[in-house]
Amino acid sequence: MNSIIDLIKKIIAAILKWITNCIPEYNPTPWNDANGVQYNNNCYNYACNTPTGTFAQPGRASGNMYNSLICSEVENGAQSDGLAPVDCDLGCGCRYCCYIVALVVAPGYDYHWYRKDRNGTWSHKPGMTQVTNLDNSGNIITDPRTADRGVYTDFCGCFCVCKGKFAIN
């Protein structure tokens, strides 16, 4: 009986490790350099954990880029790229190798993405600036819905980014 329990514990531990390794770790160092990564990648690149060097835009890789800076347009572009809408409180559940990101918009001006990291807090990369886990008031981001987002007044929703299921450019 103990060997079965030990086996079950090992299986559960392996599954949890596998799931955890799919969620990006908060490590701003590779993104915050002067060698091109910081300046040639934006919040969408960072949220998708994919430095393309192209300042990626939602929908551009799939040929369905947004036409205006409103939630529905940017959401459609991101979904076309393979991001899947999800309830922010439920997360990605048991989907294969996925993690959650959030979209906000400053209507008519700009969009912005946040990423939930392995430690349970959120981080973001504002444009060409450095990656941070702080909001506009200097607080650690525990929920982008309640964080000080500055001009990004519209909270659009959350999405799952799943390994091998999306493409950005």
Image: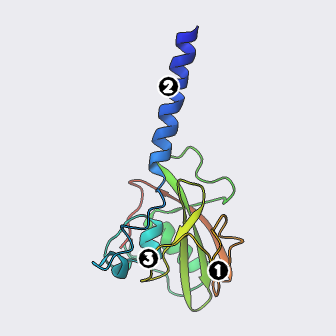
Q: Position of residue 117 (x, y in %)?
A: 53, 58
Q: Earlier in the sequence, mark 3 or mark 1?
A: 3
Residue at disc 3, secondary structure = loop
**Amino acid tagged 1:** Arg
Report the residue marked by disc 3.
Answer: 64
Q: Are marks 3 and 1 in contact (CB under 8 Å)?
A: no
Residue at x-position 57% and y-position 62%: 159
Distance (Cα) linking label 3 and label 2: 44 Å
Q: Position of residue 65 (x, y in %)?
A: 44, 79
The quarter of the image holding the N terminus is top right
Q: Which of the two discs, 3 and 1, sits closer to the camera?
A: 1
Residue at x-position 60% and y-position 55%: 120
Q: Are marks 1 and 2 in contact (CB under 8 Å)?
A: no
Q: Position of residue 105 (x, y in %)?
A: 60, 82
**Amino acid tagged 3:** Asn
Viewer-proximal residue among 114 and 27:
27
Distance (Cα) linking label 3 and label 1: 27 Å
Q: Position of residue 113 (x, y in %)?
A: 54, 73
- Colour scheme of the rendered structure: rainbow
Residue at x-position 54% and y-position 30%: 12
* Residue 10: assigned label: 2
The quarter of the image holding the C terminus is bottom left
